Image (spheres, helix red, strand yellow):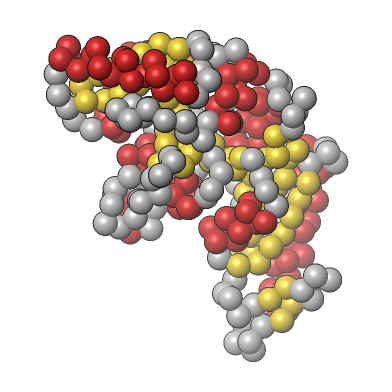
Amino acid sequence: MERLKILIPTDFSVQAEFAYLMVKKLEEKIETDIHFLHVLNVPDTVTMYAKGEIQTCGEIDVNYVLKQKEISLRKLENLKTLYGNQINVHLVLGKTTDAILNFSNVNAFDLIVMGNKGASGIKEIVSGTEAQVIARKAQIPLLSLMCDRSDLQIENILLVHNFSNPKKEGLTLLNKLIKAFNTKVHLLQITSGQVDAEKAKVEADMNLFAQLNGIDNYACHLINDKDVENGVVHFNQMNDMDLVCIGTHGKGGLFHQSATEKLINHLFKPIISFHLSK
């Protein structure tokens, strides 16, 4: 069986534990290699060499950084005590999101799983969350969640998309989940127009999309709502999906509110975000 190489960024919070419990749920059906990564958040002027030596520009106390490194390493080793020696642990220095993205690229992970504290109001507009930034910039899928989903049964996956131009997307992870858990995929498009007028065309596009992406067990849904975020929330209230899958063009930020990123911060469902093809 093909293995799934999974990266769990950890700050040793309960949210990181939620991420691990979600991965254990995936592990029930899919063989995994689990890697925990802790980023010691320091300026670019601090460097850690291969043998662990720390060098700074002089403005930051080396002994302070060494102490934080020792504390972090002890916490990482404690994860092995808690979860078993089969997990892998890593420590890097740098800016948190940049370090996570670089580590995931260099080491060719298949999936990043992150617990997310969420954000709202001015905090979301100005800085967002680490999960939002990872979703925006990562070249591999991100699975984010805000609470314990260890009791989750992955039977129904909601795939939110604009199906008007059906093409093959990067759904390798989704296809693995479908095969492993024998899930049904619910294809959802949200419109601001008249559902009855658009239904036949949208369903034809959905059928072609499913064919192009190797999805056999699926249902088609078209609903009217004011935007994607509200449409997903209202659809879940009526249908209670187990997991939400949604693509992103990677254009979130201060001047562009991404529906995917807003859902990551507001929806209490596990969310898989992936980059859409150009």
Q: Position of residue 258 (x, y in %)?
A: 33, 45
Q: Where is residue 102 in the image (x, y as percent from the top left)?
A: 61, 59
In the picture shown, does residue 30 fall above or below 11?
A: above
The C terminus - image quarter: top left
Residue at figure coordinates x 72%, y 45% from the top left:
35
In screen coordinates, is 181 left or right of 185?
A: right
Q: Where is residue 149 in the image (x, y as percent from the top left)?
A: 56, 26
- Which quadrant holds residue 161? top left
In screen coordinates, is 87 left or right of 24?
A: right
Residue at figure coordinates x 63%, y 51% from the top left:
104
Nearer the observer, 33 or 74: 33
* Residue 71 appears anywhere in the view: yes
The N terminus - image quarter: top right
All told, the count of numbered labels is: 0
Residue at figure coordinates x 59%, y 71% from the top left:
42
* Residue 15 appears anywhere in the view: no
In the picture shown, does residue 162 fall above or below 187?
A: below
In the picture shown, does residue 65 fall above or below 252?
A: below
Nearer the observer, 273 or 75: 273
Q: Where is residue 4 in the image (x, y as percent from the top left)?
A: 70, 34
In the picture shown, does residue 158 fall above or below 82?
A: above
